[in-house]
Image: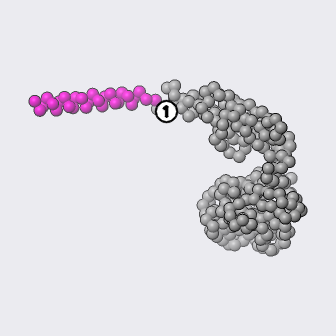
Amino acid sequence: MNLKIKINKYLYLFIGLIGLGTIIACQPDDFGSGNGLGDSSVDASFSITPVDGEINRYILESQTSGVIASKWDVGDGVFDGKMNQKVFFPDMGTYTISHIAIGKGGLTNTTSQELVVLQNDPVAGNIVEGGKFIDTDDHDKWTIHTISDSGAEWKLNEGSATIFSTSAWAQQGIYQAIEVEKDKRYSIDMLVSAEGGFINTWFEVYAGTTEPVPGVEYKDNKIMGLSTWDGCATSAFSGKLSSVGCVKNSNSDAIDNTVSFNESGTIYLYIRSGGEVFDAAGITIRNFEMRGSE
């Protein structure tokens, strides 16, 4: 009797394992590969329509058949958006707009179009000249400010600028004179990146009324920055300085990238950077902006 029970027990177990193996064998190797659960050919087409009565604002509208969700890239990286997405381009120029359509099974397809913006927004347009560092015309808008005799150097590249510091505590600045309006609030930002970490290093942004003097450390009206003492730039980083930075605004004693001025006139938008141990690849900036509030 006991022998019969044991035989039946193992027989059922064997049959169960065979059934489980059959179920597993029937599954495709890749999700969405020929099983009808995914659609890699989802239509990512979209239209671009100017918003009536609003300067430099557009509606990006995805076709909706088979689209579960939309992501967009308007030049500053991919973000989760709507199928009917309103966007704003404060600066004139040619932009590549990409729509990433998400279909069944999470599979995606991408379509891109070019958009030509013909004018700067009168309020929020970028008042920094040459902030994209694209070519020598952009580079000529900037002045290098020598502080240390040697060991630190700003290098202007095609599309970016990089600060290197090869000697302990060496530093150098870069700046541009800009005209501002009394009591108008401005925001300052840029993309910053570095491949490695730093020790006892600073990267500080100022918007002061004092003109820089060769050989003299600039300290007029600190707005934002990076500082290993304050806990950032200790490892590789990439992003908007307003997001990855940790230096407090001297006006508000808080992380704040905005500034206003008591008088209209000339200010100096300035960066000063250096340190004790500087990553060999330096700190790179792109898309330097200073914009009025809407």
In percent of the image, x 65 and y 39: which residue is there?
81
In percent of the image, x 46 and y 32: which residue is there?
29
- Provide residue 217's location: percent of width, then percent of height: 78, 73
In this orientation, does residue 12 appear? yes
Q: Secondary structure at mark 1?
A: loop
Q: Nearer the viewer, residue 68 or 142?
A: 68
In this orientation, does residue 133 appear? no
In percent of the image, x 77 and y 71: which residue is there?
219
- Provide residue 216's location: percent of width, then percent of height: 80, 74
Q: How many marks?
A: 1
Classify 278 as above or below 105. below
- Residue under circle 1? 30
Classify 68 as above or below 212. above
- Provide residue 115's location: percent of width, then percent of height: 79, 37
Residue 29 within the segment the image draws in magenta: no
**Magenta region's main secondary structure?**
helix
In percent of the image, x 68 and y 64: which residue is there?
254
Which residue is the extreme one toward the right?
Answer: 265
Q: Find the magenta span and give its range.
A: 1-28
Amino acid carrying label 1: it is: Asp
Q: Nearer the viewer, residue 63 or 106?
A: 63
